[in-house]
Amino acid sequence: MRGHMMDRQTSGMRTREGTAREVFFAFLPLGFTAFGGPVAHLGFFRTAFVARLGWLSDAAYADLVALCQFLPGPASSQVGMALGLRRAGLPGLLCAWLAFTLPSALALGAFGLFLSRSGLDLAGAGWIAGLKAAAVAVVANALLGMAGTLAATRARATIAALAAIAVLLTPWPAATQLAVILAGGVAGLLLGGVAAPADAEAVPPRTVSRPIGIGALVLFVLLLAALPVLQSFGGGADLFARVARAGALVFGGGHVVLPLLEGELHAMVGEGAFLAGYGAAQAVPGPLFTFAAYLGAVASPFGGAAGAAVALVAIFLPGALLVVGVMPFWEDLRRSALALRALAGVNAAVVGLLAAVFYDPVFLRGVPDQTSLVVAIAAFCALRFWAVAPWAVVLCAGAAGWAIL
């Protein structure tokens, strides 16, 4: 009885709105400590905001996670934005994003500035080769984890396999990736097998109105339409357009953004610098999408601190607009079995996309010789079977590369 009363009291507390300042300082410690990638970030969020602070219930939190997995963009960051939005409105969304993102963005941006000004030979440096090998291990581990949950049935495994084949065999990777994602959604609709969840409790009160949501969705569409025009201006506008397009089209978040960013920025960022930064991104907390700050810092001709800031805003802006735009309508969408079936197909296709990307460029360029393969295998074993923290694996792989490669 007492537990029931406490639960009712806690439920009442969950509906109370907070302040933007409260949101910022609740997220800031996570920005410094949330290692481990998107899945781990979701665990950190649940511990902090459901179990410890009581901002929302488990059922309400699961709703937010489902919403952000449905949307393109950085899933864990979008969950953080949604938590900030429902707690303190649009200022809360902004503060949640800043607090969770800035620690890793500043670290990676500073790393990019150091590399761009140091004149280091990234192509031949042993420690860079070690970071490339670590990237192979990290992506392989992520691929297996995603396949075990998102492509566990024969039908979804087949979708994943066909998606990988399509990406590997076609000469237009960017267009093929989008087509594969759409085809996966159609296949999910046709195959079925996913039922809409039963309502555990009411969706939390909305913090934005439907007109504001519609306005955000209109801005998202206008942004996508304007990107080719912006790109034609060159310089910072070109960098913004390329990175924003990657942020707007990536499903699955995390490592799946790698091929999109490489496809967009291959003319601005060298191969060695790209993979070095990707390896370094595993050693910092917070969202992997802050890798864009590093890419902006090392991009040419428009780079440096301004490039880092432009790329950082560009990679997150589409996802933020989608969170604001869709949240007012999520109550209806979450009950749709058709939407959930399409999402299951999209997720399976993302597994295939990641498998293709793992082969080229991650594996082919990350393990050019047997010694690099040894480092990659050791790093994978540490991640997969010994549960060593990714940042520790990356640092050790860099040290091993410096010593033996």
Image (spheres, rainbow, N blue to C red):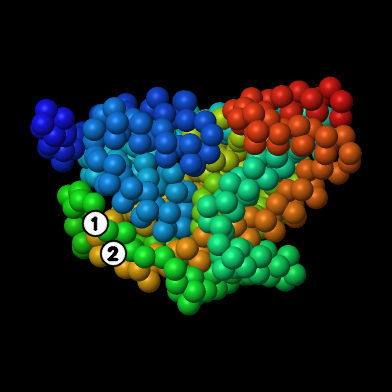
Distance, label 1 to label 2, CA atoms, is 8 Å
Q: Residue furthest right?
A: 370
Q: Is residue 119 visible?
A: no
Q: Quadrant of residue 343?
A: bottom left
The answer to whether 381 appears left or right of 339 in the picture is right
Q: Relative to residue 41, is residue 103 depicted above or below?
A: above
Percent from the top left, x then y, of residue 62? 33, 48
Task: Indicate the amino acid at tag 2.
Answer: Arg
Whether the residues at callouts 1 and 2 have beta carbons within 8 Å, the answer is: yes
Question: Which of disc 2 and disc 1 is earlier in sequence?
Answer: 1
The numbered dot on residue 199 is 1
Q: Residue at x 56, y 30 (%)?
A: 284
How packed mark 2 is, by other alpha carbons closer than 10 Å (few <14, some 14-19, many 20 or more), is some
Residue 63 percent location from the top left of the image: 31, 51
**Amino acid type, label 1:** Asp
Residue occupying the far bottom of the picture: 190
Report which quarter residue 47 is drawn in.
Answer: top left
Q: Residue at x 36, y 55 (%)?
A: 67
